[in-house]
């Protein structure tokens, strides 16, 4: 997993250089909009710095939007895609870069919203850049069903949404002033050296490529190579399965070995290979097999299924959560089992 930073305002060249030297962050969220009006000209905006970030080795996660929820129409989606493309070009983004549409809205999405997203995504596909979605986990299935499979950045889980609203419900029962309660909730000190990037599949949407597991209320602290302590406030932290969410190139799983190389129904086969992270399904030929552990990068276990005749030689295919599949080059021989007849005489 790869860890990234998301912050509305650009933190400054020196801060990002210091963070880059830690080797603990791989990418940064880059907001093309919304930012202060005329974001390309306003200090604090990310737009003028994108080329330098890429040159410095940062992966980027560009986002656009948060359209007014009263203007969800297909025509506006098409028009907003034009604005997105213009800003992406102004930032110097390369062709094929994924730009994530920010949908910072709560609850089920209206028909108008789905039409807006569909039009935006369609116009983006027809242009030089690729569309992605930044939304709540619960909204991702409806969006991808409506507009097709896209890279998804999960902004938060339903549990996180509930936790965010709880302080407002509890405030009337507290003796403290209303302004003090949100302030305590918003300030969480996070030591960068102790932060682990969680699997985005745990966000509530299994196919997520990016998961913003910490909202923009963390105070990030770290120590540089000279021992100097640093801090940055108003930080959100995100985890991704790729180091550069703007170029989400997922590797096809490769199966290099099966141990043992023969077995019968119910036997556990140890599978070794490359890029096996996220494997959720397996099959010997066309017969599905149970995956016991699909979280390893280079190994997992599967159970030989029933329904394969003894003496048959088969190959194993594994498929990850993003529907990418790889098949073993070495064969697996089915031996006689309790529910399997032997070869015909």
Image: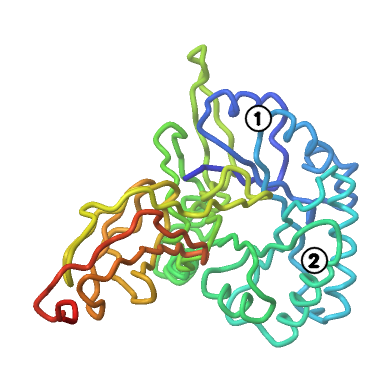
Measured as percent of width and height from the top left, residue 166 is found at: 44, 68
C-alpha distance separating marks 1 and 2: 32 Å
Name the colouring of the figure. Answer: rainbow
Q: Residue furthest bottom?
A: 111
Looking at the rendered structure, which numbered label has been put on residue 16? 1
Please indicate whether residue 36 sits to the left or right of residue 147 in the image: right
- 273 or 320: nearer the viewer: 273
Q: Quadrant of the C terminus?
A: bottom left
Q: Residue furthest front?
A: 345
Q: Quadrant of residue 142?
A: bottom right
Element assignment for label 2: helix
Looking at the rendered structure, which numbered label has been put on residue 288? none
Instruction: Name the residue beneath numbered marker 2.
Output: 125
Q: Residue furthest left?
A: 338
- The correct choice, above or below, for 132 with respect to 43 in the image is below
| Circle 1 or circle 2, nearest the eye | 2
Question: What residue is shown at x 46% (from left), y 66% (from top)?
Answer: 206
Measured as percent of width and height from the top left, residue 122 is found at: 80, 72
Measured as percent of width and height from the top left, residue 305 is found at: 24, 74
């Amino acid at each position: 997993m790869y860890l990234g930073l998301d912050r509305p305002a650009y933190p400054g060249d020196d801060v990002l250089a210091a963070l880059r030297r830690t080797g603990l962050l791989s990418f940064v969220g880059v907001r093309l909009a919304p930012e202060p009006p005329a974001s390309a000209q306003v200090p604090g905006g990310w737009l003028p710095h994108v080329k330098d970030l890429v040159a410095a080795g940062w992966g980027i996660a560009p986002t656009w939007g948060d359209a007014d929820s009263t203007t969800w129409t297909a025509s506006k989606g098409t028009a907003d895609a034009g604005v997105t493309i213009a800003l992406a070009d102004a930032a110097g983004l390369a062709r094929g870069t994924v730009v994530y549409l920010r949908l910072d809205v709560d609850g089920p999405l209206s028909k108008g919203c789905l039409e807006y997203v569909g039009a935006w995504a369609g116009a983006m596909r027809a242009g030089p850049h690729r569309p992605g979605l930044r939304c709540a986990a619960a909204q991702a299935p409806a969006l991808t069903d409506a507009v097709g499979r896209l890279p998804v950045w999960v902004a938060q889980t339903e549990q996180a949404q509930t936790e965010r609203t709880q302080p407002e419900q509890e405030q009337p029962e507290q003796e403290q002033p209303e302004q003090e309660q949100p302030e305590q909730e918003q300030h969480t000190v996070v030591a960068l050296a102790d932060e682990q990037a969680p699997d985005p599949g745990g966000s509530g949407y299994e196919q997520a490529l990016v998961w913003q597991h910490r909202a923009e209320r963390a105070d990030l602290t770290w120590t540089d190579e000279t021992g100097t302590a640093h801090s940055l406030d108003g930080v959100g932290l995100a985890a991704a399965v790729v180091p550069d969410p703007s170029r989400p190139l997922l590797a096809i799983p490769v199966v290099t070995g099966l141990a043992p190389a023969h077995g019968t129904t119910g036997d556990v086969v140890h599978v070794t290979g490359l890029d096996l992270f996220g494997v959720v399904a397996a099959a010997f030929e066309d017969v599905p097999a149970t995956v016991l552990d699909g979280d390893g990068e280079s190994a997992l276990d599967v159970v030989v299924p029933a329904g394969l005749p003894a003496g048959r030689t088969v190959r194993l295919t594994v498929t990850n959560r993003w529907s990418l599949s790889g098949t073993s080059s070495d064969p697996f021989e089915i031996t006689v089992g309790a529910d399997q007849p032997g070869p015909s005489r």
